[in-house]
Image: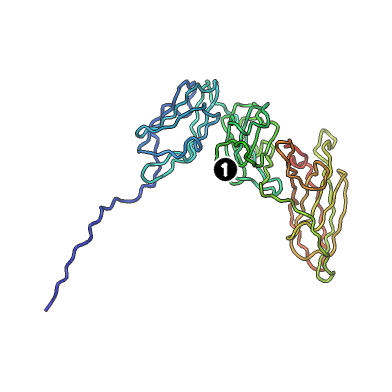
Amino acid sequence: MSVAITGCALPASPDGGPRDQQPPIILTASIRLGSTGIEAEKATWTFDEYVVLASPQQNMLSSPPLPAGTTYELKGKTLVISWPEPLLDSSTYVLQWGNTVRDLHEGNVLKGIQWVFSTGNALDSGELRGQVIDPWSGKGVKDAAVCLYPADVGDSCVMGPARYATRSNDSGYYHFTYLRENMSYALRAFADADGNNKLSTGEITPIAVTATAQAQRYVESAPYDLAPPLPLLSATAIADSLLDWTPWGEDSAGVFSFTYVHGCGPMIGDSLAYPNARPIVIQLKGKLGVYAEWTSMTPCATQKGEVHGLPPGKYTLQAFYDQNGNGVLDAGDYWEVQQPETRIFAKDPIEIKAQWTIESTWEIDRYDPIYWGVH
């Protein structure tokens, strides 16, 4: 006797094919990319599919800023940006879309859009490039707001909208484009968690400042740091302190013999200049902190130091220009117009070995603009 067992499959929706991974495509725009002589009260972009907007007031940046009260809305597959007041005369506008636009169903983001147009008869061609650094580590600071203001602006400018704004990349570098060539700006950088390129009243954050920075026509062979470095101190940074340590015995420790030259400053004509000469503090730093330090008061002088009883291990040489002569590394204060003091690092690490004397020479860079207090 045989038994036949039969059944039917559960109902299921038809296979819709592979998942859509393509971002929306711009089909038409009312203001052509790179156009000039614009006098419009709004701009529209039509896409090949329905889209959604993610906080356009925060994510879509305009340099210069669009007028207060600008609105962002969707009409079918069309994005409409309307401004209630005329745009600035003879100005190049750069709209950076960020992550604002994504498709309705899959959330694919339209990235890398930078829409440029001018209310004048030509696009501005000036650029400004540089780096935001942590002055105590020498490393770049990522995702800082970097803002340009009129050259004669006051300290409170960081509370309001910037004339131009961008963000530093993962290495701390920033890049402004389409600026008015040979025009000077006040340059600021600060931590900006909400991404609106300004500080709220009472918000506490480190702020980097330089007196003026000038937009220049881009030259391909120019270095990527045309503007002076912007020293932005981490809010959690703590200065290294001198250790209270006991030297090890000679059989298990090493000796460090050190020759250093307090840099003489840049050349002016055939002479060395050191108008900003102030004490420089040199430190030998190990795993636990600073084991020794020397203070040099005399530029261009060769000096020596020696440390006995050092535990074996890796050490580094660092120094800071003691702007106020108090012997410690100061964090600075933007509102008191005090720059953070900046560390300088020797290029080569030091390996201390038991029963060895390690000798080292360091000519502290006299051409370093940070060393000379040029911010």
Tell me residue 171's x, y (percent): 61, 46
Tell me residue 113's x, y (percent): 47, 37
Question: In this image, 127 relative to 258: left or right?
Answer: left
**Residue type (three-letter) at the residue carrying disc 1:** Ala
Label 1 sits on a secondary structure element that is loop
Give the residue displayed 79% in from the left and 53% down from the top: 283
Give the residue displayed 63% in from the left and 34% down from the top: 158
Give the residue displayed 81% in from the left and 60% down from the top: 244
Give the residue displayed 72% in from the left and 39% down from the top: 333
Colour logic? rainbow
* Residue found at the very far front of the displayed protein: 202
Vertical position of residue 213 compared to residue 105: above or below: above
Q: Which residue is mark 1?
A: 193
Tell me residue 122's x, y (percent): 53, 23
Vertical position of residue 244 compared to residue 334: above or below: below
For the residue carrying disc 1, how many other residues have a C-alpha within 10 Å: few (<14), some (14-19), or many (20+)? Answer: few
Vertical position of residue 206 compared to residue 31: above or below: below
